[in-house]
Amino acid sequence: MTSTGHRAPTGDPMLTARFAPPAVPKLLVHRPELLERLTAGTQGPLTLINGPAGSGKTVLTAHWAADGGATRPPMWLTVEPDDAPGAFWAYVLEALHRGGVALPAEVGRPTRAEGVTRSFLVRLADGLAAAAQPAVLVLDQFDTTQPPATSEGLDFVLRHASGGLRIVLTSRSDSLLPLHRYRAAGEITEIRHADLRFTDADAEALLREHHLTVSPAGIRLLMERTEGWAAGVRLCALAMQRSADPEAFLRQFAADRTTIADYLLTEVLDAQPPPTQDLLLRVCVTDRVHPDLADALTGRDDGARTLAGLARDNAFLEQIDASAWYRLHPLFAEVLRAHLRQRRPGLEPHLHGRAARWLARTGRLTEAVLQGAAAEDWGFAAAQLVDNLALGRLLTGLEADQLVRAFAGMPTVTPGPAPALVGAACRLAEQDLSGCEAALRRADAALADASPTDTDDPLADPRGPAARFGRAFLGVLAGRPADDMTATERAAADADRLLRELPPHLLAERPELRALLLAHLGAVELGAGHLDRAASTLAAAVAACGAPGTESPLSDALGSLALTELARGRLSRAAEHAHASLAVAERSALPAEHRAGTDHLVLAAVALEQDDLPAARHHLDLATAATGPRPDPPTAARAAVIAARIAVAEGDGDAALAALRSVDPAELPAWAADELAVAESAVHLAGGDAAAALRVLDAVEAPDGDRPERALVRARALLAAGRGAEAARALAGVPADDAVPIPVRAHACLLHARIAEADGDSQEAHRRLGEALDLARPEELRRMFVESGPRVRRALRQDPPSVGSPGRSTARAPARTARAPRADGRPTVVEPLSARETEVLRKAAELLSTEEIAAELYVSANTVKTHLKSIYRKLGVTRRSEAVHRAQDLGML
């Protein structure tokens, strides 16, 4: 449709369609904040809405124009890229005329399409300045394709109209207007691509308009793929309406098979000149591109200029953090790659290979490896990891999963030591031990057959120290799941020797190597029961960490060190290391699949010994639910023992036995199999079946040098069976020296006390009970007193001052510590305890259960619980043991 009034300088009629804002879509996301910014922007001379194709610039502006938010209805002009200056100004005058702006007749009209005179611009600016109110004009699609004279003329009129003209520009690229001047003067409002991107809430609102209900995870996936690109979200919504399963569509969404591809190819790629199209198709094979890399891929030297122009024009390519690097929008890159395969079949692998070598030359190892793998140049990609001592990157760090996936398609028959070593590392990362061992055998054969290469770089020699170190390194790591102490120690010795042959500067860049070696060697030593050696090795592993990339071995080493200290009976240290392991994992956002749960297992054991059953169950559940590497057999045995003890404490003997029998003793070293037997014997004892407890011990051959734990539980079983003399002889197998874990020694003291009491020697019984308390207090051991039965608790209640060695005025049961000191270092009490609360707390300190306290004080159990809650509040604690310890610190008990 055309007008019947004024004509363009060419004599053609004015196109009415150019003066009409586009219709606002019926399914629209209301964006009030942006509408308000548009309204506020028109209080000044210039508002710029800038973003790529499909970002919603025109829709937003048309919505604003139709919404009535502006103080005066704006006039609209859609600018054509081939408008000559004279034609442009003729259309501007027509837009103002149709909008009711009365200009003096002397302003005149352009008579030539090629341009206008300076006099015309002066008259127009003066006429606008004299208008009763400002004219608001939207110039839609005003891009850099406009002639410089047009931008210069618009700037002149805008600056000299004295506020009589307000311009709203929408553009894909920054216009040639001197925007820096407007910014410096505070006379511009800018709405950029980042502002136009849909938020999660915007996407959800649009999907609701399309009668689609999508889960939060689906929304996140949609936003991840589209990066908030409005047209992409809209096109996906339309496709999802046609899909039987919208959620499945999002999971399987391929941009090159949707209307998104047609949109991007037509609106973005085809709009570029052929050389730029060629560059885009070539650089799309990389996640990010440097101008020099672009030149390497195109064979030209215009990369810097072309990339800068594309970024400036919002052609779905953006500069990364003001660096020299650029990135394509992921949807655009996906469409370009599909188009590349269609237009230039066979070129993509060649481009990947060329990119890999440029990235390798410039020291970008991970990207070089990924590009080499994408080119299926397996020898090159694997050699990059081996020659640069980077096999550890397949097993630790944030890039590990990505690197392992990159080698998923590498054939097992790929020749050479490097591919075999990389294959072994990938199988190890996937916990495929048999696959790892097979790959290591291939690596051994390849190393034996390899011939030295004519190279000045000894690291690139297939038989050089880098390849041989890689083999030793993987031997140590594979020895852990295989539980092969001999092979692990031999590989560790080889790795240590080869480390001295490698360049120090390269080792300094790979701090994870030594950390991984020590962490895995220490774990193997722990699994073999060599606790002192394990503690020393794991402490060295912790000391070797700290640099970026060592977070995973640090968390692992701390977890193993916690387990070592637990086995040595040093609960405080064990808990400290376990908490440190968790802190490292959380601080470094270590993926769940890299967390073994050892730290939670240790905390469960500590909570159990301190008689905090809810915490013990909580940590055990977390340890069991861990999705990280499968625990080695000894650790699995420890987990079963802890689970069994918790089940016994909860009164479920069947669950306790089931937990223990879930582990195959045949897969365990002798000490761990014996630990299972000791735990099962204790379960039978808790059930009152001393005969069964003894049978279990007799059925398992004792390891060399009968373990104190076995001697202890045998003594308990014999005492329960009424065979006190034999129990005493069995206790002789528990030495009273520091080599025996404290919980075992303390429990042995309790048994000695019971035997002495049965013999009528109360003084000896009291002395032994005091020794048990002295041993238990530093580690806050409580569970053993509960498990020792009512006779021990009665002894503690009836005659506490006389228990123990001279000089101790009161024998208090150990309690967990939870101090909340004031500024002066003394604990704070919210308000004093009542007499009844003090009495309840005193009974709690004597290890009485809630029911026993209720019976002693002739009140209900609920009343006791109410008093305890009040005590917790006043003392600022959350548990009974903490309340007792706080009261002791305050001298209240």
Image (tube, rainbow, N blue to C red):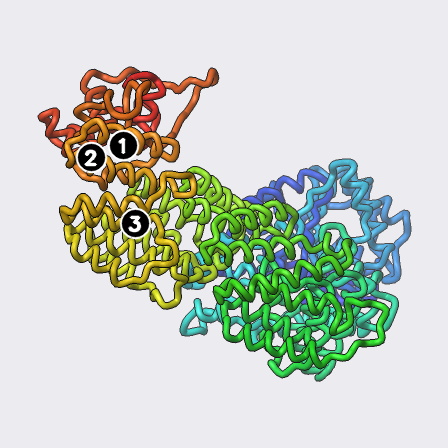
Q: What is the distance, in whole Å, between disc 2 and disc 3 at their CAs?
A: 18 Å
Query: Which quadrant of the figure has residue 445?
Result: bottom right
Q: What residue type is labelled 2?
A: Ala
Question: Mark 2 = which residue?
Answer: 756
Q: Which of 649 and 242 is in front in this view?
A: 649
Q: Residues within 10 Å of mark 1 (few under 14, many from 20)?
A: many
Q: What is the distance, in whole Å, between disc 3 and disc 1 at their CAs?
A: 18 Å
- In the image, taking residue 731 as reference, residue 267 lies left or right, namely right
- In the image, taking residue 72 as reference, residue 6 lies left or right, namely right
Question: Mark 1 = which residue?
Answer: 768
Check whether the beta carbons of the residues at disc 2 and disc 3 lie within 8 A of each other: no
Lower position in the chain sequence, tag 3 or tag 1: 3
Q: Where is residue 660 in the image (x, y as percent from the top left)?
A: 29, 59
Q: Position of residue 95 (x, y in %)?
A: 71, 54
Check whether the beta carbons of the residues at disc 2 and disc 1 lie within 8 A of each other: yes
Q: Report the disc number at residue 181.
A: none
Question: Mark 3 = which residue?
Answer: 711
Q: Residues within 10 Å of mark 2 (few under 14, many from 20)?
A: many
Residue found 12% across the figure and 27% down from its top: 856
Lower position in the chain sequence, tag 2 or tag 3: 3
- Helix, strand or loop for disc 2: helix
Q: What residue type is labelled 1?
A: Arg
